[in-house]
Amino acid sequence: MAALTLPLPAPMAARRRATAEPVLVRWLLIGVALAFLALFLLAPLAAVFTQAFRKGFQAYIAALTEPDALTAIRLTLLVAVIAVPANLVFGVSAAWAIAKFNFRGKAVLITLIDLPFAVSPVIAGLIYVLIFGLQGWLGPWLRDHDIQIIFAVPGIVLATIFVTFPFVARELIPLMQAQGKEEEEAARVLGASGWQIFWRVTLPNVKWGLLYGVILCNARAMGEFGAVSVVSGHVRGLTNTMPLHVEILYNEYNFAAAFAVASLLALLALVTLVLKSLVEWKARRQQGEVAVEFSGEQQS
Amino acid sequence: MSAAFLKTATLTWGAFWSTVSAPRVLASLRLSFGASFVAAVVNAVFGLLVAWVLVRYRFPGQRVVDALVDLPFALPTAVAGIALTAVYAGNGWIGSQLEPLGIKVAFTPLGVIVALIFIGLPFVVRTVQPVLEELEPELEEAAATLGANRLQTFTRVIFPAVGPALLTGFTLAFARAVGEYGSVIFIAGNMPMVSEIAPLLIITKLEQYDYTGATAIAVVMLVISFALLLLINLLQWWSGRRVGM
């Protein structure tokens, strides 16, 4: 990259570099790539908002303030409020264990963390039905104790935790592994306790990666459809999350309302993208600073 | 996981086979894996192009485009599903342009492919992009010095270097596509034997309280996916060894 910014003598700059494409090819490639993205990414995104406002602003507000929509919004927020902190704790402890310690079955644990990404969300939901459903392993016992998990809120929360589990852990593991144990060992030598090391050394070192994982985890938790659809039972106004509410409205040919609720989720996606870019930018800058400090040390 | 396998074990072999070899189930499995493969191939080609354009060129709005690539990760699949349907249906922006040409996208297997392209794209771009960024310019300069033209440099020097990452991206996009549900069911039309994907059939069976039938399909999907992933990993290992030599 640095080579590209070197000021070239005028006749050289006019001529094409041997390691660059002709201008025409370059713009053709950019054009094709942008057309592809417009066709597959931008068009659907724009469609959500135009469809949502097709019947006017009043209908839009009405669709969002209708009781069933409000319950769905509340339930989605509730699920995210439980699932994201839970995976924050699980993810940090799993990453911490994997990156900082050696133990038997580590490879198995790493594979298990990836499992929710590899399995279809529908199958993830199915597994919960097989375990907690009425005909499932724990079904009879749960029924006797009057606990309902499947077709109720706990099932939705559990399924969401399952599908969003990898986000935080996967983000942190490579980061923590790259940072190694030296700083923790130094803190230990200086007399810090386990918790102090964690709060003062480990956590600040991974904060951007952690935030990144949490943002993605939250987006998926609020938007999960397949797994939640299997375990929720679609009880309107009771176990419907926002994505499920969108589906119901859509299948009732109530398109404007479906897109109105969908536009909220699309807005969430846009906020997620902006936050994500910000975090990436911050993390890169921090890395850059560390690199500069490092090279400065070497030079002196 | 083990619950799924144990549940299938309660079926006799004959019952399992008759569930899985029913024409409707076979058709849905063929569609799920076939459409996922086509979508992953399209994504490999265009994902590489997008990654290339983002890494190598500078153009206005680049950072926005770069952020937008992650949209399929951030947008809930149900929203993506209804939005794609609105765009590609006969009265949609793009669907209405394709209709006179005799191309129907929504409510056909083509629609399934379109949805799977949408959700798989970032996997390819985000695995190829860092490798392209790390690529040493010296290699290309050496190729140019030795008289290679740009196309030769690309096919002989750049492509082999990003090949493994591209294959990984392809695998991730494919694996995600096979299991995808939310974005597909709206645009597919879900006609049995034609545009019904396997995950939907699992849900249909569940709604009929046919738990063992649903589990049998799930197990077949898991086994095929696992076998394919193993195959691709072997391929990767083999190509890695060849490059190493």
Image (cartoon, rainbow, N blue to C red):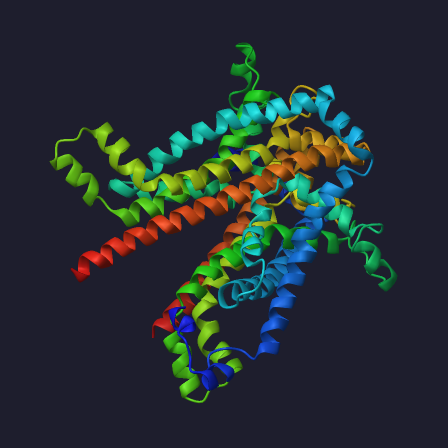
Instruction: Give the x, y percent position of residue A132.
Output: 54, 23
Q: Position of residue B73 (x, y in %)?
A: 56, 46
Image quarter hosting the C terminus of chain B: bottom left
Which of B35/A186 is in front? Answer: A186
Residue furthest to the bottom in view is B147
Q: Is residue A98 left or right of residue B44?
A: left
- Residue at image point 54% right, 21% down: A154
**Residue B201 pos. (x, y %):** 69, 40
Considering every residue shown, the one lying at the far front of the view is A10
Of all residues, the one furthest to the top in this rendering is A145
- Is residue B24 at least partly visible in the picture? no
Residue drawn 79% across the image and 53% down it: B93
- Most foreground residue, A227 or B131: B131
Residue at image coords 53%, 44%: A274
Image side of residue B237 versus residue B72, left or right: left
Give the residue displayed 40% in from the left and 87% down from the top.
B145
Residue situated in front as seen by the camera: B85 or A257: A257
Residue A295 seen in this snapshot: yes
Mark count: 0
Figure check: B147 above or below A197: below
Question: Which residue is nearer to you in this view: B113 or A264?
Answer: A264
Q: Give the quadrant of residue A66.
A: top right
- Image quadrant assignment for residue B138: bottom left
Please state the horizontal and vertical placement of residue B224, each as a whole percent of the image.
56, 51
Seen as rendered, the residue at the extreme right is B100
